[in-house]
Image (cartoon, helix red, strand yellow):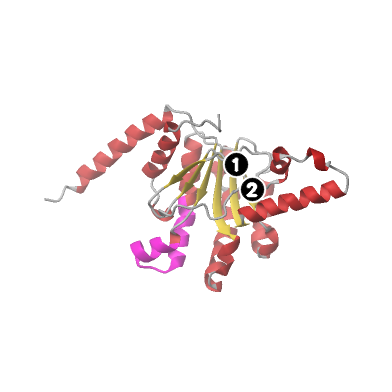
Amino acid sequence: MEVPRIITDRAYSTYESLIEKEVASGAMPKHIAIIMDGNRRYASEVLGAEPMEGHKLGREKLDEVLHWCLDLDIHILTVYAFSTENFNREKDEVDYLMELLEQALYDFADDLEVHKHRVAINVIGDPNMLPKGVIKAMEYARSRTAGYTDNCLNLAIAYSGRQDIANAVRMIAKDAVEGRISVDDIDESTVSKYISTTGLPDPDLVLRTSGEIRISNFLLWQMAYSELYFADVYWPGFRHIDFLRAIRTYQQRTRRFGK
């Protein structure tokens, strides 16, 4: 016999409330990084639609997750929005994603909640690979949220972890050649000062949706001691309860940092 939906909805709501209370009483990560994976498969397998519909819903999901972070006093959210490898997709899809990201930057920059919570909007990645419209939107978002230090949303666009490290090495080498730093003084902290997320703490928790168990060239330097969590749900279908479970798992782990 099928269970009436009103009962299942009520049970779900009760369960979600219990987890929410449990999570709220624990130590909260300061910085969460998310590999937002599964938009295309969600569109195909769940909606029976074209990939663009999945990307559109994935963009809307980011709004939700940002607000979930703000509600829990998680101050930094870094998301993998578009990798350098994603440029190898069909031109129509890449063009659509660029338009979606451009509009997203304007939307976040003008969002009243973003300004209420003083969320700085930053973009990490290679701007030389991006169309002028996206670069203009990046500059707009940065200028509109300049000076905010309470919270931060980092969008990794045209980003690669290896590229990030290579860029840092290139800048260090240049400064060493020009005498601004000594080769003998170069250590891990030096690299961290030149990496794209300099000034921010490394992610406490790196979360990937879609069920894939890999990090796909994301924040390779920064996630040296991050806790990893893989959710078996596509990004557009990622629910608040899935987010809470990830946080709870993080809270249940003992972080020793090699000690």
Quick check: 2 above or below 29?
A: below
Q: Residue 227 location, x and y as percent?
A: 50, 40
Q: Secondary structure at mark 1?
A: strand
Classify residue 130 as left or right of residue 19.
right
Q: In the rendered view of the protein, which quadrant contains the C terminus?
A: top right
Q: Observer-nearest residue: 99 or 238?
A: 238
Instruction: Tell me which residue sits at (38%, 34%) in the image.
Output: 20
Farthest residue in the top direction?
Answer: 25
Q: Could one spot residue 22 in this view of the protein? A: yes
Instruction: Tell me which residue sits at (68%, 59%) in the image.
Output: 127
1 or 2: tag closer to the N-terminus = 2
Quick check: 84 above or below 241?
A: below
Residue 4 magenta-highlighted: no
Q: Main secondary structure of the magenta part?
A: helix
Q: Residue 14 location, x and y as percent?
A: 28, 36
Q: Residue 22 location, x and y as percent?
A: 37, 30
Magenta stretch: give its range.
40-61
Asked where in the image residue 44 lies, by quadrant, the reply is bottom left
Kindly report the distance in space between the C-alpha atoms of the residues bearing marks 1 and 2: 7 Å
Q: Residue 150 location, x and y as percent?
A: 61, 35
